[in-house]
Image (cartoon, rainbow, N blue to C red):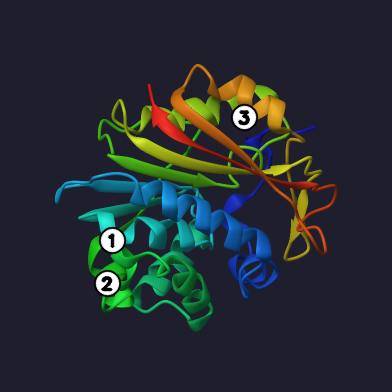
């Protein structure tokens, strides 16, 4: 077992992780997009809405899901390699994300965004943040955190801390969505091993009931090759920060 600090996150091979996870649209990601899209579309956002995605890594679809609703979006990541990758992608994101955007455009508000690449470039910034460190004074109006809290440590205490720090970034009542790999035993990226905490739906419920209101939990099956060793599905929770 090892905590977050035992790993060299700056050497994370962003391109290898992208190729394995997001080069093509997996069925489970399609299901997640459908749920998160419809959840966000059920809210009324004002013109000054600020969104945040925590631990973005090489996954742009949480930011794309927030794109029509936000004046600005902040992508927070600890890994220097991931921040470099994100900065390059924001200039004009690659074609693989078009299939993700197509799922989102099943709702009218996304179809109203005529040039999503340009909008993402103009309204999105990349920042360094350690999810186990201090919380910035800024507070965001809507937030996402996908496959992060269970994927940075093998320690339950750090998992719990990551959930609390994410919610502390958001204003009271702010809508949020989070996803988790279920029963992950860790993962390899570019020949290097990275940690995971094997959690299930009950664990997520136990952690989140004090942090959110109106919570809804979803279990998404992985129909084909598991995304990680031991992974038996994906857990999605959305609701509003207390």
User: How many angstroms separate mark 2 from mark 1 (CA)?
Assistant: 7 Å
| Cβ atoms at labels 3 and 1 below 8 Å apart | no
| Element marked by disc 2 | loop
Relative image position of residue 50 (x, y in whole percent): 25, 47
Query: Badge 1: how crowded within 10 Å, few (<14), some, or many (20+)?
Result: some
- Percent position of residue 145, x then y: 49, 44
- For marks 2 and 1, the one nearer the N-term is 1
Q: Secondary structure at mark 3?
A: helix
Q: Residue furthest top?
A: 210
> Contact (CB < 8 A) between labels 2 and 1?
yes
Quadrant, the N terminus: top right
| Lower position in the chain sequence, tag 3 or tag 1 | 1
Mark toward the viewer: 2 or 3: 2
Residue at x-position 39% and y-position 67%: 87
Residue beneath disc 1: 68
Give the foreground label among 3 and 1.
1
Q: Is residue 98 left or right of residue 150?
A: left
Residue in view at x 43 percent, y 55 percent: 37
- Pointer 2 residue: 113
**Label number found at residue 159:** 3
Dot 2 or dot 3: first in sequence order is 2
Task: Judge whether 95 appears above or below 180 on screen.
Answer: below
Dividing the picture into quadrants, the one containing residue 118 is: bottom left
**Left or right: where 64 falls relative to 30:** left
Residue at the location (33% across, 33% down)? Answer: 170
């Amino acid at each position: 077992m090892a905590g977050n600090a035992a790993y060299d996150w700056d050497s994370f091979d962003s391109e290898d992780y992208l190729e394995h996870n997001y080069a093509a649209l997996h069925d489970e990601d399609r299901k997640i997009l459908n749920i998160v899209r419809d959840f966000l579309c059920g809210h009324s956002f004002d013109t000054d809405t600020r969104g945040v995605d925590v631990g973005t890594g090489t996954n742009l679809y949480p930011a794309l899901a927030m794109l029509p609703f936000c004046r600005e979006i902040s992508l927070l990541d600890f890994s220097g390699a991931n921040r470099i990758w994100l900065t390059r992608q924001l200039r004009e994101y690659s074609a693989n994300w078009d299939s993700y955007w197509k799922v989102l455009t099943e709702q009218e508000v996304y179809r109203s965004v005529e040039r999503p690449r340009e909008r993402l470039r103009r309204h999105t910034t990349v920042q360094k943040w350690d999810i186990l460190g201090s919380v910035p004074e800024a507070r965001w109006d809507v937030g996402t955190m996908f496959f992060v809290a269970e994927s940075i440590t093998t320690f339950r205490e750090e998992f719990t801390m990551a959930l609390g720090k994410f919610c502390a970034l958001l204003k009271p009542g702010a809508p949020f969505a989070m996803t988790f790999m279920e029963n992950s035993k860790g993962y390899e990226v570019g020949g290097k091993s990275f940690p995971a905490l094997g959690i299930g739906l009950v664990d997520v419920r136990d952690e989140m009931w004090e942090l959110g209101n109106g919570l809804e939990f979803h279990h998404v099956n992985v129909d084909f090759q598991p995304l990680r060793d031991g992974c038996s599905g994906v857990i999605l929770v959305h609701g509003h920060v207390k």
